[in-house]
Image (cartoon, coloured by chain):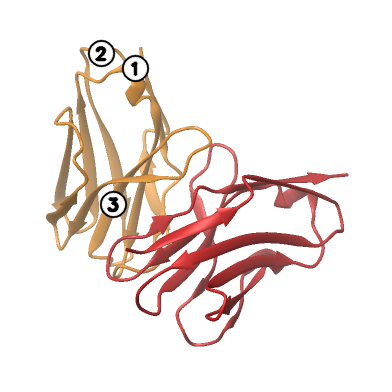
Chain colours: A orange, B red
Amino acid sequence: DTEVTQTPKHLVMGMTNKKSLKCEQHMGHRAMYWYKQKAKKPPELMFVYSYEKLSINESVPSRFSPECPNSSLLNLHLHALQPEDSALYLCASSLNTGELFFGEGSRLTVL
Amino acid sequence: AQSVTQLGSHVSVSEGALVLLRCNYSSSVPPYLFWYVQYPNQGLQLLLKYTSAATLVKGINGFEAEFKKSETSFHLTKPSAHMSDAAEYFCAVSEDTPLVFGKGTRLSVIA
């Protein structure tokens, strides 16, 4: 299994809602990542988990809350988001700090 | 600090013509270098990677790239463009930190 699976593929939420994005991999990778990608831009790193511990937080606002329940799962909890947070959210995993394996992404729209 | 510069935000070629997408890197140590492709509304897919084993790297879909240390370049080429190659292409570099992406080059293929 060489896939990173993200759910949901599309999410529409209001600014007062609480929702979560989910990511799963079964490749035995010990590093997992959240990226945010706006249209016509490269992915921007948000968070990195290494061995289930948060190792990098790129000064992301607290309305984004990551969670790594186990080595295969990564969640991104969303609360009180702003319209400018609308973007494609990409999950990725890796064996080390080299090649990343990406999921198909979750397209988030904040109304 | 590591970085990559992709020359040309948009490249347009005729079907059957040579594809050349340019990437220059900046790194204080021999880096790992990657090319990823992103089709509309999808995640990123690895095309090829350089990890110091060989300077000419062959990837999927007929793409290849040559690592040139003297020019600090890692340009992506394909001898004959297909319509299906139309996509966004990202060059990325990694030392001991998560991947750093270039700004991307959009490839259009004209019939």
Q: Classify mark 1: helix, strand or loop.
A: helix
Quick one: quadrant of the C terminus of chain B? Answer: top right
Which residue matches tag 3? A33
- At a point 35% along the width and 53% down the height, the residue shown is A92
Say what amino acid the circle numbered 2 marks: Met
Instruction: State the residue at coordinates (60%, 44%).
Output: B39
Spatial CA distance of label 1 from label 3 is 23 Å
In the foreground, A90 or B76: B76
Q: Position of residue A49 (x, y in %)?
A: 19, 55
Where disc 3 sits, the SS reads strand
**Letter of the chain that mark 3 sits on in the rendering:** A
Q: Amino acid at mark 1?
A: Pro
Image quadrant where residue B79 sits: bottom right
| Label 1 or label 3, whichever comes before in sequence order | 3
Q: According to the image, label 1 marks what residue?
A: A83
Q: Residue type at mark 3?
A: Tyr
- Report the Cα–Cα distance between label 2 and label 1: 8 Å
Quarter of the N terminus of chain B within the rendering: bottom left
Q: Residues within 10 Å of mark 1 (few under 14, many from 20)?
A: some
Q: Is residue B46 above or below residue B52?
A: above
CB-based contact (under 8 Å), mark 3 and mark 2: no
Residue bearing mark 2: A15
Whether labels 3 and 2 belong to a single chain: the reply is yes
